[in-house]
Amino acid sequence: MSSRALLVTLLALVAIWGAVAAVMNATDKHTSTPEKVLNLMAGAPWLQEGASDLSEAERRKQMDATIAQMNLLDFDQRRQMREDGQDVSDRYFQSLNKEEKSYFLQQTVEQHFKSVMKAFNAMSPEDRRKAVERARADMKRNQGDQRGMERMQKEDAQAFEKMVEKGMGAYYEEASAETKMDLAPLLEEMQQRLRSMPGR
């Protein structure tokens, strides 16, 4: 192989890898992983030892970065995040004040599940019961989702029955911020089920 051919090949490889690096850099802000979200949560400045008080704007900026990455996760990635980092996400959520919890829920849970709630509320009470039971059975098979459901039932022993009777929207409106966060896995499971139904 001549030195000219070797030089052309080398330059082509450098150009290809340069293009790959540019594409990866450009798409990095549009892709997320459970690890990215968990790292943002664990790295929240107010959770660090010796952290000074942050302004409301600084806290919101960090929350928005976390929310943006979390909202890029698909169903399986959210499940993986709960399984791998439930302690991290619980610690993060508990560190938020009441207004921040509400904002976090609005941005990460509520906006994604309005369609699920609407479809669920349109069901008959018997169909709701079946849907909740199926989703709970699926969640029991995925042990990572179990702690939130147990916490929710401890707080409100009749939680699932109320969902069936009142409809999810009515129950959700009355629920505490912690219960809403615990409901997220159930809502995601139901959303996945609704998407897989014929005609959707």
Image: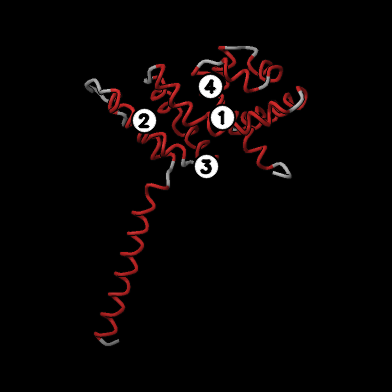
Mark earlier in primary sequence (2, 4): 2
The residue depicted at 58 percent of the width and 32 percent of the height is: 113
Q: Which residue is mark 3?
A: 74
Q: CA distance from mark 2 to mark 4?
A: 18 Å
Q: Of helix, strand and loop, which one carries label 3?
A: loop
Quadrant showing the N terminus: bottom left
Q: Are marks 4 and 1 in contact (CB under 8 Å)?
A: no
The residue depicted at 77 percent of the width and 25 percent of the height is: 124
Q: Residue flagged by tag 4: what amino acid is it?
A: Lys
Q: Position of residue 37 (x, y in %)?
A: 40, 36
Mark earlier in primary sequence (4, 1): 4
Q: CA distance from mark 1 to mark 2?
A: 20 Å
Q: Of helix, strand and loop, which one carries label 2?
A: helix
How packed mark 4 is, by other alpha carbons closer than 10 Å (few <14, some 14-19, many 20 or more), is: many
Quadrant showing the C terminus: top right
Q: How many marks?
A: 4
Mark whose residue sits in front, 4 or 1: 4
Check residue 185 in the rendering and tell me which mark sits there, or answer none: 1
How packed mark 2 is, by other alpha carbons closer than 10 Å (few <14, some 14-19, many 20 or more), is: many
Mark earlier in primary sequence (1, 2): 2
